[in-house]
Image (tube, rainbow, N blue to C red):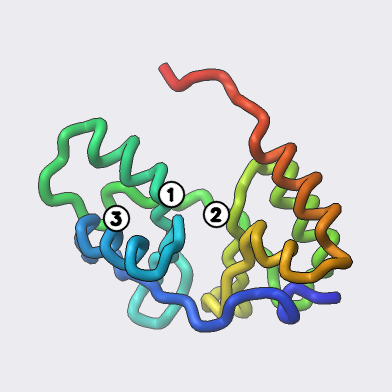
């Protein structure tokens, strides 16, 4: 099975100048923990996670931050043709819960750890990936 078979295709995105408050509201409304950031041509340039908001916005006392101020820009992505076993391995090795799916630099979807659990045949991969993702790392200094 390929990533295209599991990924979410209808992904809400932000642009570089979207306010962190609006991104947080979108996360709440959609019950998601990450919003991809795209330029005007739908090229993926970053991702804002709930963790980014806490660490790079709230903890630093910023009042009017934009996506570009808090987003993670060192992205790990896959293509729609990536096999789901490979995607699970990538998530596990990099301790990430969400993988943007890109084609020719353009965002076409997102794959989350929960997407694996929707298919009974991938429950083990989801569990293994989650156990690796959830391993504690050393605290930031």
Q: Is residue 47 above or below residue 11?
A: above
Q: How far separated are the C-alphas under marks 3 and 2?
A: 14 Å
Mark 3 neighbour density, 10 Å: few (under 14) some (14–19) many (20 or more): many
Mark 3 and 1 residues: CB-CB less than 8 Å, in contact?
no
For image coordinates 60% across by 73% down, the residue present is: 102
Q: Element at badge 1?
A: loop
Whether tag 3 and tag 2 are in contact, CB under 8 A, the answer is no
- Tell me the tag on residue 75: 2
Q: Position of residue 16 (x, y in %)?
A: 29, 64
Q: For the C terminus, which image quadrant?
A: top left
Mark-to-mark CA distance, 3 and 1:
9 Å
Disc 3 target residue: 68
Residue 32 lies left or right of residue 29; in this view the side is right
Instruction: Tell me the residue that label 1 is attached to.
Output: 72
The correct choice, above or below, for 65 with respect to 131 in the image is: below
Helix, strand or loop status at disc 2: loop
């Amino acid at each position: 099975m390929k990533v295209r078979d599991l990924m979410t295709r209808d992904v809400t995105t932000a642009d570089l100048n979207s306010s962190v408050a609006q991104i947080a509201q979108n996360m709440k409304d959609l019950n998601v923990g990450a919003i991809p950031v795209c330029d005007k041509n739908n090229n993926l340039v970053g991702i804002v996670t709930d963790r980014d908001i806490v660490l790079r916005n709230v903890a630093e006392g910023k009042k009017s931050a934009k996506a570009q101020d808090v987003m993670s820009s060192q992205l790990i992505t896959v293509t729609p043709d990536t096999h789901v076993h490979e995607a699970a391995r990538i998530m596990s090795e990099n301790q990430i819960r969400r993988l943007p799916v890109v084609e020719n630099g353009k965002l076409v979807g997102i794959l989350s750890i929960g997407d694996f659990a929707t298919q009974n045949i991938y429950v083990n991969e989801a569990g293994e990936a989650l156990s690796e993702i959830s391993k504690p790392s050393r605290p930031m200094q």
